[in-house]
Amino acid sequence: MEDNKHPIIIENVSCSRGNRVVLNNLSLKVFPGKCLTIKGANGTGKTTLLRLLAGLQKNTDGKILFGGKDILKIQQEYKNHIFFLNENNPIKNAFSCFENLSFWAELEGTEKLIKKALAFQNLESLKNVPAKFLSMGQKRRLNLSRLAITNKKIWLLDEPINGLDKESVDNLCSLLNKHLSNNGFLVIATHFDLNLETNTIYL
């Protein structure tokens, strides 16, 4: 599959939560090398759309195509391309920053990138500190540092800059621009404007 040459196509997709329609007949395309930003008030379906794109939630109507194939029919192959980052930090509190990054890097075979990941969000001085002693902002930066060790092509980020200072946001935008320059996919749900060239949809 030429995964980084064709768009992800969302075709007439609807999704309900309980008895409430969250997304209704939505169609759009996500192109490699182009950022798509999702904006809207709380409860309008931003996270739902990201979960649909991640293959974590099923649409009630329509389909999502990747490489011309319905993602529900190629679930494992598709999920191998996905990096989904949200506010549910998968951090192991008993592990240090270095140990957390080592654990994630080992899953992807990118152990050589751990030093770069620590530098990405200025965590070098905290690398031996157990995560349970980190502030919420520091845990947020540690979670974001996973971006610096992943080889996944499709990045789906849910409110990635909450709790970050300007330097951390600038570092993040620099990495996101590099990902786009490598023809990666990027979809961000955020209330904020980032230093990225982007197409924006409002839900």
Image (cartoon, helix red, strand yellow):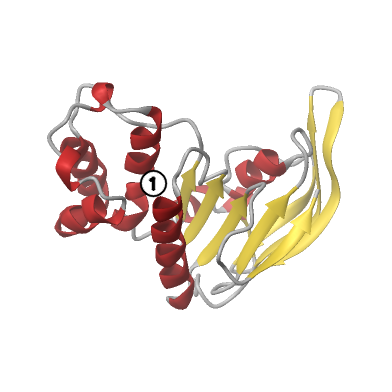
Where in the figure is residue 117, as x and y percent of width and height?
25, 53
Res. 109 in view = no
- Tell me which residue sits at (58%, 60%) in the image: 194
Q: Residue furthest left?
A: 128
Residue 71 screen position, x and y as percent: 61, 53
Residue at 55%, 65% in the rendered image: 195
Question: Number of numbered discs present?
Answer: 1
Residue indicated by mark 1: 144
Amino acid type, residue under disc 1 in the picture:
Leu
Relative to 76, say whether 29 is above or below. below
Residue 77 position (above or below residue 33) = above
Q: Is residue 88 at least partly visible in the picture?
A: yes
Taking depth in this image into account, of 116 and 79 the one nearest to the observer is 116
Q: Residue at x 59, y 53 (%)?
A: 188
Query: Left or right of 145: which side holds 80?
Result: right
Q: In the current view of this chain or complex, which residue is farthest to the front?
A: 166
**Residue at x 54% of width, y 78% of height:** 5
Q: Is residue 150 left or right of residue 184?
A: left
Choose top left, top right, bottom left or bottom right for residue 199: bottom right
Instruction: Establish if 41 lies above or below 27.
Output: above
The location of residue 52, given as percent across then percent down, is 65, 45
Up-down relation of residue 181 to residue 172 (above or below): below
Q: Nearer the viewer, residue 169 or 84?
A: 169
How crowded pointer 1 is (Cα within 10 Å; few <14, some 14-19, many 20+) is rated as many
Left or right relative to 147: residue 19: right
Q: Secondary structure at mark 1?
A: helix
Residue 86 horizontal/vertical position (percent): 51, 39
